[in-house]
Amino acid sequence: MTGLSNSQKQGINVQGTKKDIENLPRHIAIIMDGNNRWAKQRKLPGKLGHRAGVEAIREVLKSCERLEVEVLTLFAFSSENWQRPPTEVSALMSLFMRYLKKEVKELHQNGVRVRVVGDRHRFSSKLQKQIEDAELLTRDNKTTTLVIAADYGGQRDIAQAARQLAQKVKEGQLEVDDITAARLDETIALSDLPKPDLCIRTGGDHRISNFLLWQFAYTELYFTDVYWPDFNETELIKALQSYSGRQRRFGKRDDLMHGVQSA
């Protein structure tokens, strides 16, 4: 691709480093919404909207790598998405397979670690193998961790963590009183990664749709009307600027955040 990027044309400096943005999040989670509406707006088949969405993933991931964001988590396919028309589900599964086949070698070369979170048992054996191969190839990479949430649901995530702890109680490894929020936090998905600092949702809806419910306890939320295929570096910088201007108190008072006690 030649010429200026959309972000450069619009006058936002996206060629800087993490030093150019204050309070850069360590972990960004994105609900990628609007592919179908983007395609419908252009009188195109829905599958072309999903393909355009893959291009947006490439651009946003490259921006996160350059800005040294530690973790990027993408909500690719929810546990409720199986209720969509079979043709659309099939197209999404094929696209997921192609993405892993085509992108993983380059991701590996760039030092990106790939993780997939969710219940992968309903995927085809070929897709499961593709996921395992991608995770194995990239497991020791350190640049950025790309987490793909596929067949994932936040409620089920919490229920599975609770079930694991209940099983340990049953086996005598834990007492009931040992089950605390901290213990469940250690058992939930992505417990080894920083909590999401910022969740971005594209497409205009203002909800989190059963995504990382436990992990989002103190996550900052950013909603945009931009459809996911149109979400680029410019839009990411807008989200980061919004995040940078917020004060995260984690339940504390403003004065205590600055070490000042008030009467």
Image (tube, helix red, strand yellow):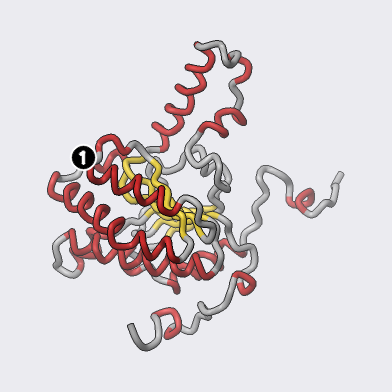
Name the residue beneath numbered marker 1.
83
Query: Which quadrant, please, contains the C terminus?
Result: top right
Q: Is residue 207 visible?
A: no
For image coordinates 25% across by 53% down, the residue present is 97
**Residue 131 image offset from top left, x and y in percent:** 33, 47
SS at badge 1: helix
Residue 4: x and y, percent? 40, 86
Q: Quadrant of residue 25?
A: bottom right
Q: As shown in the figure, which amino acid type bears the numbered disc 1?
A: Gln
Q: Indicate left or right for 67 with 157 as reference.
A: right
Above/below status of 222 relative to 183:
below
82 sits to left or right of 239 = left
Residue 127 in the figure: left or right of residue 140: left
Residue at the spot 46% in from the left edge and 67% down from the top edge? 236
Task: Please tell me how crowded label 1 is: few (under 14), some (14-19), or many (20+) other residues with Cα within 10 Å.
Answer: few
Q: Is residue 180 above or below residue 153?
A: above
